[in-house]
Image (cartoon, rainbow, N blue to C red):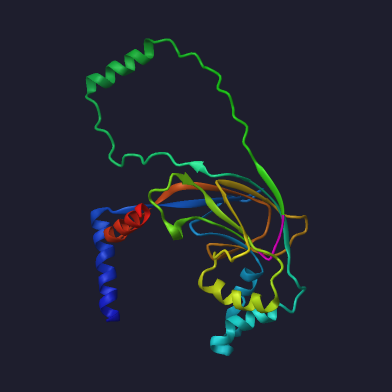
Amino acid sequence: PESTNQVQHITNATLAILKGETVPLDVLQIKGEKEQPVFAVTGLRWGSYRDAGVKVSKYWYLGPLKTKAAHFFSTFKEWPQKHQAALMYLGPTERPPEEAEEKPSRPPLYVRLYRRFRLYWSSPPKEVPQEVTPEDWEELKLSTIELSIATRNRQLDLTRTEDFMDICIEADTVSKGQFVNRGSQKMRDPHMCPEGSQCIQASRCILQLPEGTEGSFGIDNEEYEAMPVEVKLLPRKLRFFCDPRMREQMLHAAVQ
């Protein structure tokens, strides 16, 4: 049965490519003060669960207990473990309509020549100054055991009318036992946002860390030095081949 399922998955993936069936995925642009931007499809994590998670492989000799061991031994550090920062963010943005995938046909040569001559002889249009609407930034100070900034790609909704990323600020008051148990859950679902966390929907955010902050970010499971960053949502930036039946299921679920 397992080999049959694998063949079915390969067949469905091949059909999706042949038919050109795609779904749009969001991308996060993460930029430090000096570094080139990094792009993420899943998201960014900063905190104690991420730090403990990268050490799980060191306890390989404990077999199935290695995950709990990594989180248990990490509680021997200063406790409670708090990550402090300042966060500025902008709310969700309205989602524009889907752009047509088919490009319009090129007009005949005489039409293109006429347009060029008309553009050449016409006077340049007067520039009308546009009013710049000030951006409505929200700001907060945070103290958390872990902060995550994630796309909505895990919960695709092809009919939603707003674009945003999820910011999860977890409480820093968890007990050591809760930390160990939740750490196992985080290994299966790294961007889960536990009950009692502060959840924010944003299209853009700036994370300011105190001077001298040590540690690392996890960006799509790659490790980067922790530093002040600006995270910007790039909605529907990536087209991903998808089984047509899964696409229909997502549309049907969204309607319900």
- Residue 49 in sight in this render: yes
Classify 128 as above or below 153: above
Q: How many marks?
A: 0
Tell me which residue sits at (77%, 55%) in the image. Answer: 211
Locate the C terminus by quadrant.
Answer: bottom left
Q: Position of residue 40 (x, y in %)?
A: 51, 56
Which residue occupies the foreground of this view, 250 or 20?
250
The region drawn magenta spans: 142-146
Which residue occupies the foreground of this view, 90 or 234?
90
**Direction from residue 153 to residue 56 in the image, left or right:** right
Tell me which residue sits at (25%, 73%) in the image. Answer: 7
Q: Position of residue 113 (x, y in %)?
A: 28, 18
* Residue 195 position by quadrant: bottom right
**Direction from residue 80 to residue 102 in the image, left or right:** left
Q: Position of residue 160 (x, y in %)?
A: 42, 48
Which residue occupies the foreground of this view, 208 or 189?
189
Tell me which residue sits at (73%, 69%) in the image. Answer: 81
Q: Residue 251 magenta-drawn?
A: no
Classify 149 as above or below 50: above
* Residue 80 position by quadrant: bottom right
Characterize the magenta stretch by its predominant secondary structure: strand
Q: Position of residue 8 (x, y in %)?
A: 25, 71
